[in-house]
Amino acid sequence: MAETASDPAGRIVVALDLDGVTDKAGLMDRCARVLGLPEWFGRNWDALADSLADPSVWPEGAGERGLVLVVENWRGYAAARPEEWQVAEEVFAEATDRGPGLFVTLG
């Protein structure tokens, strides 16, 4: 799992660095590793949306304090697979709407 920090409001901040990610499989693997998602994570769009919206699988402490997911170096993936990236953005937005305390931002 990636290193975490906290923002001024006390929320856990996790950087999801997509450098080198050029397809859905790479995105799913990176999300699973960085967020420490459980082994049973399905590595599909629905599973990602469900995991992002579920505070019980967030990094330690984030369920109580909130989670800020900063998606960095995403432009390469967006350029390589624009249709997939559009779905990824929709998944991030849906999860943010469903997940209390979840904020996703593009860095």
Image (spheres, helix red, strand yellow):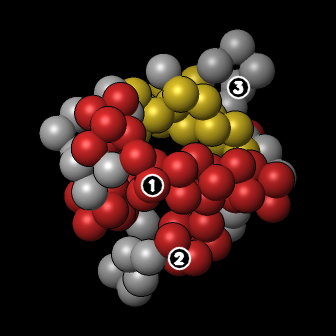
Q: Mark 1 against mark 2, which lies toward the viewer?
A: 1
Q: Position of residue 56 (x, y in %)?
A: 64, 67
| Mark 3, residue position | 10
Q: Residue at x 82, y 53 (%)?
A: 97
Q: Nearer the viewer, mark 2 or mark 3?
A: 2
Task: First in sequence, mark 1 or 3: give its number.
Answer: 3
> Which residue ends up furthest to the top in the rendered image?
8
Q: Secondary structure at mark 3?
A: loop
Mark before the other along the chain sequence, 1 or 2: 2
Residue kind at label 2, given as amino acid type = Ala
Instruction: Please say whether residue 5 is visible from this viewpoint.
Output: yes
Task: Identify the disc placed on residue 47.
Answer: 2
From this view, report whether residue 91 is shown above or below residue 72. below
Measure the alpha-carbon separation of dots 1 and 2: 18 Å
Residue 54, given in percent of the width and then of the height, sits at 67, 66
The local secondary structure at tag 1 comes to helix
Residue type marked 1: Glu
Quadrant housing residue 41: bottom left
Q: Nearer the viewer, residue 49 or 101?
A: 49
Marks 2/3: CA distance? 27 Å
- Name the residue tied to disc 1: 83
Question: Image height check: is 36 above or below 82?
Answer: below
Callout 1 touching callout 3 (CB < 8 Å):
no
Question: On the rendered structure, is 70 left or right of 72?
Answer: right
Residue 74 position, x and y percent, is 37, 33
* Number of numbered callouts drawn: 3
Mark 3 crowdedness (10 Å alpha carbons): few <14, some 14-19, many ≥20: few
Q: Give the percent coordinates (x, y) of residue 69.
A: 55, 38
